[in-house]
């Protein structure tokens, strides 16, 4: 098996990898690192979760070290363009981690923060700059930054940048960077417009492709509820409060809704039944987004409702469940969404809620992504609860006073607490149905009795004992 040391990386970078605890390179790293070290342009079809950040960052750091150039005034040596603030933040953090021993200066600039601060911090230039295109052009227009110094240019998640309307920004930036730079271009999909951009930006690029679609799907169990649109909230509440068992042990639950208002509505209604959750979408301020992500990461508020754009590229380990509260109308988006779970080699659970008018989307998803769903029945008492015959909200409230999605401690580096010693549980009688509820299972155990889902992937109702 190929090791990092076989790829031609320098000692400081190998040491930084050691510190990060990475032992073997991922497929995209194996394919991309050698040609990037040689100075070739690269076109990579890959999405987050494949290890692509390290695939472009590690060899670039080595090239910057080798060239031994000065940090340019009001410019940078390596420019990484990313679509969202969150992704830019993550890339900048990786650059700092991987470049820790290489002595390179890393900065990031994103929209929604003070332009003045950005102007000041870039005045003396930086070695690596991670930027969203809009903010970068703001600074260029204010004559606070130039791109003359760029030796390496990275476009990350180019298709997403186009979706967000950055096409003009990208065309402009392509005119401002030096001709003799190296370009590394990444996109999860390759529609025509992207191919044109590749033609504009890259010279004879080496093409590498990893197909997380199938590999991700292999590690993600996908379940489906057929449910009416106006009943989805009730179903969500029953699942999150463990009144309806779904497979897997909840650690962090990422829920996708189609619109910003939809996200807010779900959060509000969960709050009304005592289930704290946060939303992240384009209408939230930068500090609000950061706080929501941080609370999610630390599993302080382990339920996050997001739109596609806000969640794209988010790399948070330990997302145990992705719930598609509304199905995306673009099948690729479904793949991106469920790819938020099963990160870094772990398994994951994806649950889709499909209403009558979303059947077409479901059909498309099945056709284009080979997704295979195991259909789950609605809870026995679902109708009664929906129609208000079941326990009223008032009666439910004390039971739901705390989210049943609990931190397992891994985010904080602590071990999960023993189940029966959890303070929330101490001395409490078992809830109805808790024997089959996800939280009642020992960690890692799945319905059906094992982690090997291949036995239990689909069509095995015996594996799922619903009340
Ligand atoms: P990315 O696709 O760049 O967003 O990376 C996905 C996740 O995989 C991040 O949490 C990385 O820190 C992690 N990762 C990247 N390369 C490796 C590796 N070789 N071994 C283990 N984890 C890695």
Image (spheres, grey):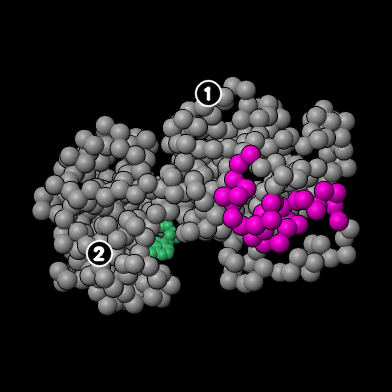
Magenta residue span: 430-459
Q: Are marks 1 and 2 in contact (CB under 8 Å)?
A: no
Q: Quadrant of residue 71?
A: bottom left
Q: Residues within 10 Å of mark 1 (few under 14, many from 20)?
A: few
The image shows residue 39 at horizontal and vertical percentages of 15, 59
Q: Considering the numbered disc 2 on the image, is that residue within a helix, a strand or a loop?
A: helix
Which mark, residue 59? Answer: 2
Gap between marks 1 and 2 measured at Cα = 44 Å
Q: Is residue 164 left or right of residue 298?
A: left
In depth, the one of 390 and 120 nearer the eye is: 390
Is residue 112 visible to us here? no
Please tell me whether mark 1 sits on a helix, a strand or a loop: helix
Residue 17 percent coordinates (x, y): 36, 72
Q: Which callout, 1 or 2, points to the residue nearer the camera?
A: 1
Q: Residue at x 47, y 36 (%)?
A: 370
Instruction: Tell me the tag on residue 360.
Output: 1
Q: Residue at x 75, y 45 (%)?
A: 465
Q: Residue at x 56, y 58 (%)?
A: 318
* Residue 269 higher or lower than 124, as above or below: above
User: Could you say where residue 282 lies in the image, as x and y percent from the top left?
Assistant: 49, 40
Crowding at dot 2, Cα within 10 Å, few <14 / some 14-19 / many 20+, comes out as: many
Residue 84 showing in the rendered view: yes
Would you identify the image quadrant in which residue 26 lies?
bottom left
Query: Percent position (x, y) of residue 431?
Result: 85, 52
Position of 457 with respect to 333 (left or right) is right
Could you say which disc has been placed on residue 392 in the image? Answer: none
**Where is the N terminus found, in terms of image quarters?**
bottom left
Task: Check residue 178 for magenta coloring.
Answer: no
């Amino acid at each position: 098996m190929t090791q990092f040391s076989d790829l031609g990386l320098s000692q400081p970078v190998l040491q930084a990898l050691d510190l990060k605890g990475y032992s073997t390179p991922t497929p995209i790293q194996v394919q991309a690192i050698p040609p990037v070290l040689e100075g070739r342009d690269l076109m990579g079809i890959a999405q987050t979760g494949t290890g692509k950040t390290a695939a472009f960052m590690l060899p670039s750091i080595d090239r910057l070290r080798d060239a031994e150039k000065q940090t340019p005034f009001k410019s940078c040596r390596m420019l990484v363009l990313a679509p969202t603030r969150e992704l830019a933040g993550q890339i900048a953090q990786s650059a700092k981690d991987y470049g820790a021993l290489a002595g390179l200066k890393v900065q990031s600039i994103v929209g929604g923060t003070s332009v003045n601060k950005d102007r000041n911090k870039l005045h003396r230039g930086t070695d690596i700059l991670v930027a969203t295109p809009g903010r970068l052009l703001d600074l260029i227009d204010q004559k606070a930054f130039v791109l003359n110094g760029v030796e390496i240019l990275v476009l990350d998640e180019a298709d997403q940048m186009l979706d967000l309307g950055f096409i003009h920004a990208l065309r402009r930036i392509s005119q401002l960077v030096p001709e003799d730079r190296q370009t590394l271009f990444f996109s999860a999909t390759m529609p025509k417009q992207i191919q044109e951009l590749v033609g504009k930006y890259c010279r004879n690029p080496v093409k590498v492709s990893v197909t997380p679609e199938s590999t991700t799907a292999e590690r993600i169990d996908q379940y489906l509820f057929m449910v009416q649109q106006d009943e989805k909230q009730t179903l969500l509440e029953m699942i999150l409060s463990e009144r309806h068992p779904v497979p897997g042990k909840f650690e962090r639950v990422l829920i996708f809704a189609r619109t910003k208002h939809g996200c807010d509505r779900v959060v509000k209604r969960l709050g009304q039944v005592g289930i704290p959750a946060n939303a992240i979408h384009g209408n939230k301020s930068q500090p609000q987004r950061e706080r929501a992500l941080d609370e999610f990461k630390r599993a302080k508020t382990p339920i996050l409702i997001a739109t596609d754009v806000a969640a794209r590229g988010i790399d948070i380990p330990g997302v145990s469940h992705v719930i598609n509260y509304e199905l995306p109308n673009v099948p690729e988006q479904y793949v991106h969404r469920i790819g938020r779970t099963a990160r870094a080699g772990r398994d994951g659970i994806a649950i889709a809620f499909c209403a009558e008018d979303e059947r077409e989307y479901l059909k498309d998803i099945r056709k284009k992504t080979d997704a295979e769903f195991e259909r789950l029945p609605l809870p026995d008492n679902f109708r009664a609860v929906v129609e208000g015959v079941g326990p009223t909200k008032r009666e439910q409230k004390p039971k739901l006073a705390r989210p049943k999605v609990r931190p397992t401690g891994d985010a904080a580096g602590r071990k999960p607490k023993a189940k029966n010693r959890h303070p929330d549980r101490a001395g409490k009688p078992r809830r109805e149905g808790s024997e089959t509820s996800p939280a009642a299972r020992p960690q890692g155990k799945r319905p059906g009795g094992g982690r090997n889902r291949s036995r239990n992937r689909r069509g095995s109702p015996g594996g799922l004992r619903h009340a």
